Amino acid sequence: MMIQPFDDTYFMKKALQEAETAFQKGEVPVGAVIVLKNQIIARAHNLTETLNDVTAHAEMQAFTAAADYLGGKYLRDCTLYVTLEPCQMCAGASYWTQIDRIVYGATDLERGFKNCQTKLHPRTKLTSGILEEECGQLLKRFFIERRNLN
């Protein structure tokens, strides 16, 4: 059995690296990468504290970087890998990008787009639970450390 080097786990690990970078900066540790034809065209992590901007989520930063890379606003043949289920703002933005696929790690039962009943673009395929444990543990560690600091 041959292992595909560029699978969902491979790219989610890249998104987790971005989440670790966010963690080191004191940002909520969410990371994202956007992939086109097995090539990462955008990498991003939360920057809401750094930029003092509530819209600076990892996904939003990645959408901007990918659109810039492609020279257009539509991400039709792309896949977003993100460590946490997108919120309704990010899911709404993904709708407008017409992204082909979203893959996320940990589920956000409170603020995730599914709980908020935010619709994805009809052509967007969804995969969840990739490296869910690792993604969730990083978030838990961050919030435990934050509580202990206060």
Image (tube, rainbow, N blue to C red):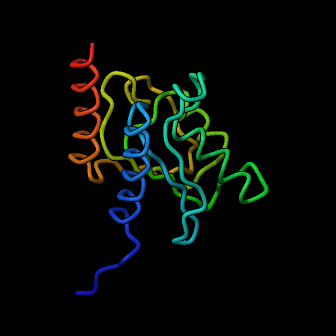
Q: Nearer the viewer, residue 43 or 72?
A: 43
Residue 2 place in picture, x, y as percent:
28, 86
Residue 18 place in picture, x, y as percent:
44, 49
Does residue 8 appear to the left or right of 145 in the view shown? right
Q: Residue furthest toward the bottom?
A: 1
Q: Residue at x 44, y 30 (%)?
A: 113
Q: Nearer the viewer, residue 24 or 118?
A: 24
Q: Residue furthest toward the right?
A: 71
Q: Residue furthest toward the top?
A: 150
Residue 122 place in picture, x, y as percent:
56, 45
Above or below for 138 versus 15? above
Task: Count all numbered tags in the image, as a single digit.
Answer: 0
Above or below for 82 versus 115? below
Q: What is the quadrant of the C terminus in the image?
A: top left
Residue 143 place in picture, x, y as percent:
27, 25
Q: What is the quadrant of the N terminus in the image?
A: bottom left
Above or below for 46 versus 4? above
Above or below for 59 versus 143? below
Residue 84, image quadrant: top left
Q: Residue at x 45, y 36 (%)?
A: 86
Residue 50, image quadrant: top right
Does residue 93 appear to the left or right of 3 in the view shown? right
Residue 36, image quadrant: bottom right
Does residue 62 appear to the left or right of 17 in the view shown? right
Q: Residue at x 51, y 40 (%)?
A: 58
Does residue 25 appear to the left or right of 63 in the view shown? left
